[in-house]
Image (spheres, rainbow, N blue to C red):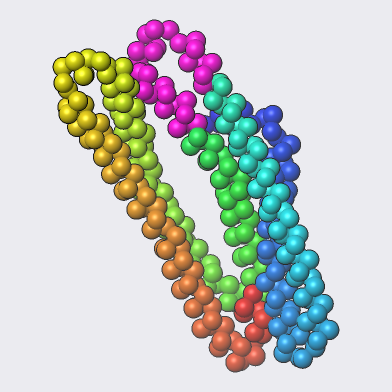
Amino acid sequence: MFSLFKRLKPYRWTIVLTLFLILIQTLCELLLPTLMAQIIDKGIVNGDQGSILGFGVQMLVTAVVDSACAIGAAYFSSRVSLGFGRDLRSAVFNKVESFSLHEFEKFGTSTLITRSTNDVVQIQTFSLQVLRMMVMAPLMSLGGLAMALGLDPELSLVLLAGMPLLALTISWVARRGMKYFRQMQTKLDQLNRVLRENLLGVRVIRAFHRESTVQEKFRKANEDLAETAFRAMRIMAALMPAMMLLMSLSSIAIVWFGGWRIVSGQLQVGSMMA
């Protein structure tokens, strides 16, 4: 894996720019709830129109900067991933061109086709996700937790309690899903092999009237791939509802305990909303 990402070296400055834009975007998104809390606590509660207008303008500027950074990060990360995919596809092609006949027979044509097309696309998509979500998510989590601790350390214990459950859920789904994704690669190779055999032997198949046998063979390979893909997608589809459930339960707990702290005068409404 690390040898693959060495090919990202020509794009290192674009990656640095992308990470910088993601950092600014994360800071802006973390700042917005704090500004909203200020509007409520200093503006709405006190009836101060000037504070509402001032913090509202700050929120508007922050939102514009956030959007601009998000667009820029998406643009540059896409350029990096597409360029990386192009270079990797060329490298795979050049490597296959240098294979001996023994190596061709060892891998098989269908496997080499899959490696040059589908696998490169998967790696390209993964690199894009790393640049976007896998960098932004930890920054958002750590930054949000730090800001929550700054606003109210005791109420932040609710968030700390939910984080291990969230991590365990993501880990369980990832482990279950990876098993089926590996199987998908093997079954995709099988489907490509059956399709290639049918195309190369079409005259023989028609001469001996073996169309029904070939169609059944392709149907079985196709259904095997589809069934494995459905299983993988069903597991991955459960991730978002599970995450939303945990987040909703955390929100309910925050509102519940935060309400008691507001009544006792230990917390302001805006801080709880943030």
Query: Where does residue 185 sit, x and y in percent of width and height?
Result: 37, 34
Snapshot quadrant of residue 258: bottom right
Magenta span contains residue 135 = no
**Residue 172 visible somewhere in the drawing:** no
Q: Is residue 234 above or below residue 44?
A: above
| In the image: residue 22, left or right of residue 209 | right
**Which quadrant of the figure has residue 201?**
top left
Residue found 48% across the figure and 15% down from its top: 96
Residue in the picture at 68% in, 54% down: 70
Residue 67 showing in the rendered view? yes
Q: What secondary structure is the stretch in magenta mostly built from? A: helix
The boundaries of the magenta stretch are: 92-120
Position of 265 relative to 102 (above/below): below
Q: Classify the position of the C terminus by image quarter.
A: bottom right
**Going 43% across and 52% down the picture, which residue do you hit?**
171
**Residue 62 vs residue 227: left or right?**
right
